[in-house]
């Protein structure tokens, strides 16, 4: 009997240790996206009243990161977590400032060191560290528990240089606070580009001082007829700054020559009169017919188009023969480039169904020159690859593999946003309450299980700038709507863009996304509880 008791006691101890080990292992904490390499060690680091952050290296950006980390730790733990250049227990070691995004995170029992040759690398190391804590660290309220991270070493770097998402703020406008909220959630997933789709048929969303009616009239409504809205240039600068502090570069898009009804409603003198944006399919079809030759441009009476609040696409075009069109574009690109520190300017170029092919080619080639003259690199939807691209410009693949190939053959890179995988506005399944499904239903596993370098014939890793997940907002009205379509799929896309392909694994992702789900839940993020995951 005694023997039995002893054996029982030993097995309880062993079991407890095993459980503890499992709980404590650094490769089981649920890091999202999965790092390139995680080597667990025994033991753990515990945050307590004497924990402090040491900055090694200089610069405003590094101080910002230290405060960012300190703030998160303070919120959850209630400890003071001072930040200084003096010896501390969590060290942010910026070894040089070469813009490197890779980092090392070493967690020992006494000390945590995050080191990198770039501030963005330090920032990503901090994101990984935060995720190594219990999920409650993400709660806005302090809780009483042991704040432990398992020991080990992580060596990590991104697979693709461009890891992005897009918000369509035209179809439904989103205010500055909403965009910042989105930026915060993107940053946690190590995404580094936010593409703002600032203009479309339904609304113009950025103040242009030399063409004020673009926002006064063009910004005054949205899908469904709501009041719309727009960013002043000051708002935009504020967003750019907020994003850059989180190592996210803003890519502004002005969609043209199609998707331009808001421009044509604002300035009648630009309207060639082939836009009849009544929204019903019959009218749209009529306007397409007109564009195909019925209308003699010499007979045009130029007057403002009506504002459009439906969700049809492909009925509008700028007049590519009109010099005033290029004056507008030059002014818009100049004003917007001046407040955009990032390298890219997105010129749209999609679904210009009522622009004649030759006119489209002339237009896109001329607009690329305008963008270049203001010091920016053009990105455009894949249709732009049917024109001659300037060296370095980028085609964003969304629908047509042939177009991606045309870009590649011209020696230009492709940004991968295949609608069947990366479109966040697609429904999860036929019962999803919002979203569209023209490209596909995209369940979480489908958003995860693809490889950009193996998706389109002839397009391999070297041809790919990166990956972007767009959220079109025809059906997205509130923050809850946005969160529901974006999460958890954005995490899947982030991992596609960050993690080495050979390390990616759906079973592992499934476990980690359930932990990520807790982090979202604690902040009331309205994510979709995919039935594929044991939440
Ligand atoms: C196609 S994707 C569009 C957008 C729509 C989207 C809806 C692309 C370049 N154009 O205008 O919002 O589908 O999914």
Image (cartoon, helix red, strand yellow):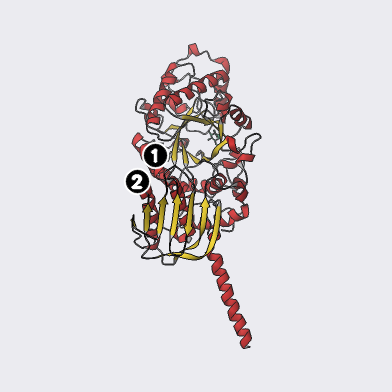
Classify 10 Å Cα crowding around label 2: few (below 14), some (14-19), many (20 and above): few
Picture quadrant where residue 206 is located: top left
In the depicted structure, whether residue 336 falls above or below residue 144: above
| Residue found at the very far bottom of the displayed protein | 1
The answer, for residue 352, to whether it is visible in the render is: yes
Classify 10 Å Cα crowding around label 1: few (below 14), some (14-19), many (20 and above): many
Please state, as top left, top right, bottom left or bottom right, where the C terminus lies in the image: bottom right
Which residue is labeled 1 in the image?
240
Asked if the residue under mark 2 is in contact with the one under mark 1, i.e. CB atoms within 8 Å, the reply is no
Tell me where residue 17 appears, x and y as whole percent. 55, 72
Q: Secondary structure at mark 1?
A: helix
The quarter of the rendering in which ligand 1 is drawn is top right
Tell me where residue 172 appears, x and y as whole percent. 46, 38
Tell me where residue 382 appears, x and y as whole percent. 57, 30
| Residue found at the very far right of the displayed protein | 457
The answer, for residue 429, to whether it is visible in the render is: no
Per the rendering, the mark at residue 395 is none
Mark 1, ligand 1, within 8 Å: the answer is no
Which residue is labeled 2 in the image?
60
**What residue is rendered at 54% in x and 65% in y?**
23
């Amino acid at each position: 009997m005694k023997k039995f008791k002893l054996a029982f006691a030993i097995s309880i101890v062993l079991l407890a240790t095993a459980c503890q080990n499992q709980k404590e292992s650094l490769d089981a904490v649920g890091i999202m996206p999965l790092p390139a390499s995680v080597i667990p060690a025994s033991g753990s680091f515990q945050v307590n009243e004497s924990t402090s952050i040491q900055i090694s290296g200089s610069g405003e950006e590094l101080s910002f990161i230290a405060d960012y980390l300190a703030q998160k730790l303070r919120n959850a733990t209630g400890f003071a977590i001072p930040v200084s250049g003096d010896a501390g227990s969590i060290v942010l070691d910026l070894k040089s400032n070469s813009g490197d995004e890779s980092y090392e995170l070493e967690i020992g029992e006494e000390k945590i060191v995050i080191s990198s040759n770039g501030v963005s690398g330090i920032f990503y190391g901090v994101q990984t560290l935060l995720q190594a804590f219990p999920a409650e660290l993400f709660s806005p309220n302090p809780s009483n528990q042991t704040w432990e991270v398992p020991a080990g070493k992580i060596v990590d770097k991104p697979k693709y240089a461009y890891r992005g998402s897009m918000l369509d703020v035209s179809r439904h406008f989103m205010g500055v606070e909403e965009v910042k909220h989105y930026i915060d959630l993107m940053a946690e997933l190590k995404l580094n580009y936010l593409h703002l789709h600032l203009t479309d048929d339904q609304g113009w969303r950025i103040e242009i001082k030399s063409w004020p009616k673009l926002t006064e009239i063009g910004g005054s409504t949205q899908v469904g007829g709501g009041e719309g809205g727009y960013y002043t240039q000051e708002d935009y600068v504020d967003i750019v700054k907020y994003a850059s502090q989180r190592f996210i570069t803003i890519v502004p898009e002005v969609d043209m020559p199609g998707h331009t009804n808001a421009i044509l409603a604002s300035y009648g003198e630009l309207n060639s009169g082939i836009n009849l944006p009544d929204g019903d399919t019959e009218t749209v079809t009529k306007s397409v017919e007109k564009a195909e030759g019925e209308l003699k441009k010499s007979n045009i009476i130029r007057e403002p188009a009506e504002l459009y609040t439906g969700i049809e696409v492909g009925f509008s075009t700028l007049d590519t023969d009109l010099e005033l069109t290029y004056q507008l574009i030059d002014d818009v690109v100049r004003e917007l480039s001046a407040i955009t520190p990032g390298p890219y300017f997105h010129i749209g170029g999609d679904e210009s169904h009522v622009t004649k092919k030759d006119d489209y080619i002339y237009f896109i080639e001329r607009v690329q020159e305008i963008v270049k003259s203001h010091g920016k690199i053009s990105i455009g939807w894949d249709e732009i690859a049917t024109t001659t691209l300037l060296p370095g410009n980028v085609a964003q693949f969304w629908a047509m593999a042939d177009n991606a190939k045309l870009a590649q053959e011209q020696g230009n890179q492709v940004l991968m946003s295949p609608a069947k995988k990366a479109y966040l506005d697609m429904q999860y399944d036929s019962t999803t309450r919002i979203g569209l499904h023209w490209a596909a239903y995209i369940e979480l596993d489908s958003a995860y299980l693809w490889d950009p370098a193996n998706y389109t014939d002839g397009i391999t890793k070297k041809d790919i700038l990166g990956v972007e997940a767009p959220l079109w907002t025809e059906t997205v009205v509130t923050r809850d709507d946005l969160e529901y379509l974006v999460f958890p799929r954005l995490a899947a896309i982030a991992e596609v863009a960050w993690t080495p392909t050979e390390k990616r694994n759906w079973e592992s992702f499934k476990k980690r996304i359930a932990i990520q789900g807790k982090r979202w839940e604690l902040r009331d993020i309205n994510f979709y509880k995919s039935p594929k995951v044991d939440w």
